[in-house]
Image (spheres, rainbow, N blue to C red):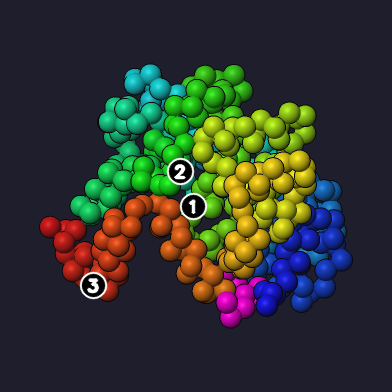
Amino acid sequence: MSAPSMALLVDALQHPECLGVLRPGQWDLLIRQARQADVLARLAAGAQHAGCWHAIPPQPRMHLASARQLALRQHTELRHEVLEIERALQPVGLPVVLLKGAAYALAGLHASRGRRVSDVDILVPRERLADVESALMMAGWVSTNRDAYDQRYYRTWMHELPPLRHMRRGSVLDVHHAILPLTARFTPDTQALLRSSVAVAGREGIRVLCRADMVLHSAAHLFHEGELEMGLRGLVDLDALLREFAQAPDFWDGLVQRARLLDLEWPLFQAIRYTGSVLQTPVPARVVAPLQQRLSVSPWRLRWMDALYLRALRPDHASVSDAWTPLARWALYLRGHWLRMPPGLLVVHLLRKGLSSAYPTKARHDQEL
């Protein structure tokens, strides 16, 4: 049993020139799906880049223009925020190594076109985490999560500090010391990622991951997430990265080698399978078949993976869901937690979170104490 088609949204993302011929009912559905998937500004950016912006009818164009303006404003604010973070980390002698959307924007990649950025993610060495946190606190960033369990959970098992918010500007900063949790099944070497990072526009104080690592981090982040309601946005990121980087003749071979070195072959396999299935991302056959063989992926396992991911990696909208979609999302939510931590810790964590949800008043009281 296959899920409803989302060809309308995929075609609009991949072939923006088709936007000029859509009927009003199609526009209504497309805008709802794109907004739910957080890719409405991407549609606008795609139309502008393809030169078909003025072929879009005025009413839907207003929705796209609004989303596009918000994304542009976020990018402007992001650049200012990155300079502030660079200034804050100067006393500890560390560069700002950007991750995800902030990296795409500062590096000027195609993946940043129309991509909304709500916070800034940076990567630092774990052994310098205390120095980094102190420097950021001196510059005005503070943790807004005062729950004792959450603090211990982040600092003992996770790959990042609890989110920091600037007291004056309200900006949110996620400080990572790894790209996956310390208890995860896969353990990429943070030092290898930092050593291969590259400066942005010649500024040594602002850096991004190298191209292969950028793809692998995006894949690891998406396919270790338990909550995939925004999964299509992650796939669109990967599609844009792969299409742009594949213009280099040695990219694919380097990507596969780097995935093996960083213990990220599984996320890479999933990334190329589902960007290809959903967005028709071109991947050479010489990359896919050996990777599948090396990972010993059986046809039975592939069928189960497809049944789950091809439902969960969709906008959280009734028009592209079926009766099995909630089950697929729930199963992958559990899988995401299973990949993050060992069984004993997982049971304790889920029980704790379940009780906190069931008794929110007591949880707030405990937090205040």
* Cα–Cα gap, marks 3 and 2: 34 Å
Indicate which label's residue lies in the foreground, 1 or 2: 2
Label located before the other in sequence (1 or 2): 2
Question: Badge 3: few (under 14), some or many (20 or more) residues near its Cα, within 10 Å?
Answer: few
Position of residue 195 relative to residue 38, above or below, is: above
Marks 3 & 2, CB-CB < 8 Å contact: no
Indicate which label's residue lies in the foreground, 3 or 1: 1
Q: Amino acid at mark 3?
A: Tyr
Q: Is residue 293 visible?
A: yes
- What residue is at 40 percent from the left and 30 percent from the top? 124
Nearer to me, 17 or 167: 17
Quadrant of res 353 = bottom left
Q: Amino acid at mark 2?
A: Phe
- What residue is at 75 percent from the left and 49 percent from the top? 281
In-image side of 224 versus 310 (left or right)? left
| Residue indicated by mark 3 | 359
Q: Is residue 173 visible?
A: no
Position of residue 354 relative to residue 336, above or below, is: below
Nearer to me, 106 or 328: 328
| Residue indicated by mark 2 | 186
Nearer to me, 72 or 116: 116
Q: Which residues are magenta?
A: 316-324
Marks 1 & 2, CB-CB < 8 Å contact: yes
Task: Determine the secondary structure under disc 1.
Answer: loop
Quadrant of res 360 = bottom left
Q: Amino acid at mark 1?
A: His
